[in-house]
Image: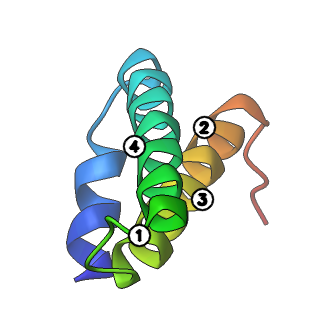
Amino acid sequence: MSNKIIKQLKNLSKDELVTKVRELEAGLFQARMKKVTGQLENTASLWKMRKELARAKTLISQAASPSKTA
């Protein structure tokens, strides 16, 4: 499943990736608040959101840095 997510993220432009990161951060915050209040049923969603956020941030940083070629 992560391969699908990575492919989808790679097809996004830098601006779209930044927007996606903001959405993921907001969603993660909401999920954390639900967890604290006991309203979050699927705690695995926190893990999934963190991983997707990290993937998006990684792609942004890779696009910003010059690519290294051998």
The answer to whether residue 9 is above or below residue 44 is above
Which residue sits at x=49%, y=28%?
A: 22
Q: What crowding class fits label 4: few (fewer than 14 Cα within 10 Å), some (14-19), or many (20 or more)?
A: some
Mark toward the viewer: 2 or 4: 4
- The numbered mark, 1 or 4, whose residue comes first in the sequence reads 4
Which residue sits at x=26%, y=60%?
A: 7
Please, what is the three-letter code of the amino acid marked with disc 1? Gly
Please, what is the three-letter code of the amino acid marked with disc 2? Ile
Q: Where does label 3 land, which residue?
A: 54
Q: Position of residue 57 (x, y in %)?
A: 61, 46
Q: Which mark is residue 38?
A: 1
**Front-most of 24 and 7?**
24
- The numbered mark, 4 or 3, whose residue comes first in the sequence reads 4
The answer to whether residue 68 is above or below residue 16 is below
Separation of residues labelled 2 and 4 (CA atoms): 19 Å
Separation of residues labelled 2 and 3 (CA atoms): 10 Å
- The numbered mark, 3 or 1, whose residue comes first in the sequence reads 1
- The quadrant of the rendering that contains the N terminus is bottom left
Q: Where does label 2 land, which residue?
A: 60
Q: Secondary structure at mark 1?
A: loop
Mark toward the viewer: 1 or 4: 1
Q: Where does label 4 land, which residue?
A: 27
Q: Residue furthest top?
A: 15
- The numbered mark, 1 or 2, whose residue comes first in the sequence reads 1
Q: Secondary structure at mark 2?
A: helix
Q: Residue furthest front?
A: 37
Mark toward the viewer: 4 or 3: 4
Please, what is the three-letter code of the amino acid marked with disc 3? Ala
Mark toward the viewer: 3 or 1: 1
Separation of residues labelled 3 and 1 (CA atoms): 25 Å
Q: Secondary structure at mark 3?
A: helix
Separation of residues labelled 1 and 2 (CA atoms): 34 Å
